[in-house]
Structures are given as structure tokens and as C-alpha cells.
Amino acid sequence: MYIYSASQIKSADAYTIEHEPISSINLMERAAVAFVQKLLEIVPEKEEFYIFCGSGNNGGDGFAVARLLSYLQKTVHVLYVEQSKTTDDCQTNFERFLQLLATNSLLSCTKLETVGCIPEIPSHACIIDALFGSGLQRLIAGELQKIIVHINSCKALKIAVDIPSGLFCDALTSFESTVFEADYTITFQYPKLQFLFAENSCRVGEWHCVEIGLHHNFEKQTSPCAEFVTAEHIALKQRNAFSHKGTFGHALLIAGSFGKMGAATLAARSCISSGCGLLTTHIPRHGNTIMQIAVPEAMTLCDENEDIISSVCEPSKYSALGVGPGIGTNEKTYAAVEAILQSKKPTVLDADALNILACNRHLMNLLHENCIITPHPGEFDRLTHKHNATFERFETQKQFAIQHNCTVILKGRYTCTCMPDGHIFFNSSGNPGMATAGSGDVLTGIILSLLAQQYSMQQAAVYGVFIHGLAGDFAKQAVGEESLTAQTIIENVYKALLYLRK
């Protein structure tokens, strides 16, 4: 699923109108029908609707939705704001609505000039926001601001048409800005970029994307801002009947220190569970018994140091390298991280490996096109600088990936992967239960396994994140969010892989 900018979406509409061909008013009608179908899936029990309409095309959608709901014998109150300019399609749908208003007692219409014109909205009703669409580029002020503040204070369920009014499609909308606070957003054809950032969750609510039949040739000739990864993106390699363990790669995992061998075993178990043929773990000497009992499939190479990683064996012998889970930040461990980076092998770095980079910033100059780093927001801020919003961090992530020619996986609700060329992928799988100790170590193991199996850097990163999230979703089904652990994610990796095979 692609993510486009507001201007690109406008171009997609125009392309569809020209090449389908279809009139703009009929395309708007198609969008309204799709909206109403999804609306009634979400709130099948609602019988009364208050629809706030502006004078742009988003308002035109609102008038069309009002008319369609009236056909279904719903009680509909339209409250519209007349602005300086009304689009042609909005005017057409307004006139169609007025014709129906004259003969339908379930409809009412109120022109909103001040916030005082808004009637009392009962809590059992549903509010639909069609005031401003994705083309908005200015802050809402004056009486319109008061209207939205008032709507937000209402107890009724709130649903936005395409995008909540006041939310910018492509740019950061400040915390102080007035934005419609939707419980649900039903958006057309493509998710909007701003839906994917934490600061907008209370504005967007739960979002649903509905197909409105925009011309798919547009996608073939237009580069998206980003991609939203679903199961359809994942194409696992087929295994040949004559394969052997060497066929699927030999991974080297450098992990563990005193008190943190759990991180090493979690990463090792997930690596084995994700299809890697052979796994060698380079661990502190004291961890040998722990690893061989916890992950008997893994071979061990013991560091000369009892409690920490202080060196690294010959990395060129291995298909792919993983470093970071539980290694600590002892100064003696720095050299091992440096040696890994200098090898230029396909490498995933996580956890303490990233903290070592943050403390020794010159090591970031050794990052290369075969590197994947997997920071959570705190680790990324230590690598770069403090950010006040997730959208700001996203902008820095793109700059970092391009500058250091590496793949950056920024973990979160919609984990964002940025490739060295700036190509962006947001992940759709996963759930809040995965915000638990060791979850990141499991992700490191999965990505390391895919790298060892000769998946490309992009595939290893994007597929790994999706498989990790999908395994977490199966784990949630089994134990719920509160009881979900890193181990239950590993135990469900096989379900994720079977699902993707099907």
C-alpha cells in the first residue's frame, strides 16, 4: 500500500478523471459510497448523524454522505460553514442535498456562522467531520477554531472523512493547533503520512483505508512518499528439496555480558526459529553453559574475557553478522564493534552496539550500505539529538540513513525502515503488547537470520520487521497483550512464517 503526499493524491484524482474516464462529481460519489459502507461496518447501530461540512471538496464528500445516509432512513443533521470559495463539486452536492431536504423529514440543515448555532448533540449520535480535507495548509483560527473545539468537547462518537480537519497531510501539525479529534478516520485509497506518528493518534483515532478506484497506472509512474507494508509485500524464498543447512547461511551473533545473557539467548533463539542454517554465538566465557542449555542448536565461541565481549573472531567466515544484544558498553567491547563494522559484511546492530556508537561517534563513519541499525526512539536520539515529536525524528532518520549510507529501522507502533537511498517503509503488523523487555533482541535475531539466508538488505529489514510484528500478533491471540513476552513472540515466529507461506 502506497503513501502519497497531498499534491500527489490530487494528481491521482486528476489522472483517474482523465484516463478512466470519469467525471469529478462521480468520483466524489464513489468515494462517498465507499465511506458510507465502511461507516456502517464501524457503527451499524447508529441512527442519528451530525455532519459538519465545509465548502471545499471535503465538504462535498460530507453532503454526499448525508444524502446516502438519508436513503438508508438515517436521521441526518447537516451543519455547514459557508466560506469565501466553494468548489464546483461541493456546490453540486450541496444542491443535490437541498433538493432531498425539501421532501425528507429525516434531514435538517443549519448554516454555521458562530459556535452558538450548533445544537446540542446527544451522546448516542455520531459526528462526522467533513470541514477540511488533505489540502489544508494553514492553521484553523477564528470562529472555525471555536467550532472544532466545541465539537471535540461533545460526547458523541466522532468520525473524520479522509483526514481530521486541521491536520496537515504532509507536515508536522503542532500540539497547540486545533484539530478535530476523531475516534475513527475513514480515508480514501491511500493512508496519509501523518496517521503514522504518535502525536496524531488522539486526532486520527483508528483509521481505515477504503478503495475508491483511483487509476492504478498512476501508481506505476509516480514514486510514493513511502510504502505501508502488509502481508502482500512479503515474498519468502522457496526451499529446494536438495537444500542442506549450509544453503541457508551461517550467522554470527555477538551478544551477552554478565547479567545480560538473556538478551543473547533470545536473539539466538529467534535467529534459529527464522530459518538460519547455522548459528555461531560469540559470547562471554561465563555464558557458555547458559547458551548451550537455552539454545542447543547454536554453536558457541567464548570470548577470552569471562564477563564481557572484548574481541571478535574472524567475521569474514560468516554469511551475516549481528551485534549488540546485552553486550554492555565496557570500553573493551568498543574494539569488537569496530572490527565488525570494518568487515563490511551484512550486519545488523542493535541495543548496546548502538549505545557504543553514540559514545564513540567516529565509529558512525564506519557504517556502510550492508549495515542495518535498529534503534528505539531513545537510542536514536542518543545517536543524533533530542527530538520533540516523532515526525521530527522521522525527518532526521531519513537524513541519517542517506548520510551514513545504511538502513535505519526506527522501532515504534508503525516501525519505520529507511533505506540508504531514502526509500521509506512503514510496518502494519504488531501490537502494544510487544513493548516488553527482549522484544528488540528477537527482532535482531530475525533480521540476522534473513541476512544469513541471502535476502537483500531491504528484504531482511522490511520482512524482518513484519515477521516480528506478525509473530507478536499471534502471541497476542494466545496470551493477550499484558502477558505477552519476548519468548512468546519467538514461539509464534513459526505461525507467522506459515501464514506468509500461505
Image: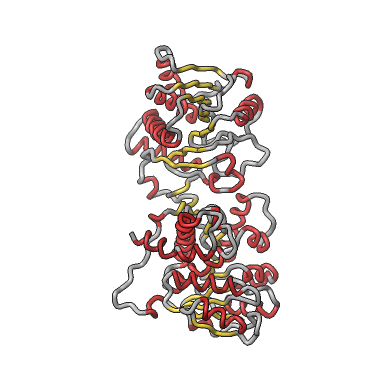
Q: Quadrant of residue 314?
A: bottom right
Residue 50 on image: x %, y %: 51, 24
Residue 200 on image: x %, y %: 59, 43
Q: At 56% from the left edge and 58% from the top edge, which residue is drawn?
A: 411
Q: At 64% from the left edge and 49% from the top edge, which residue is drawn?
A: 389
**Of 455 and 238, which appears nearest the observer?**
238
In this rendering, does residue 425 appear at all?
Answer: no
Is residue 63 shown above or below 11?
Answer: above
Q: At 50% from the left edge and 80% from the top edge, which residue is drawn?
A: 280
Quarter holding the C terminus is bottom left
Residue 201 falls left or right of residue 317: right
Residue 198 falls left or right of residue 58: right
In this rendering, does residue 220 appear at all?
Answer: yes
Q: Quadrant of residue 234?
A: bottom left
Q: Residue furthest bottom?
A: 304
Residue 367 on image: x %, y %: 58, 70
Q: Quadrant of residue 379?
A: bottom right
**Of 263 and 146, which appears nearest the observer?**
263
Q: Residue furthest left?
A: 241
The total of numbered circles placed on residues is: 0
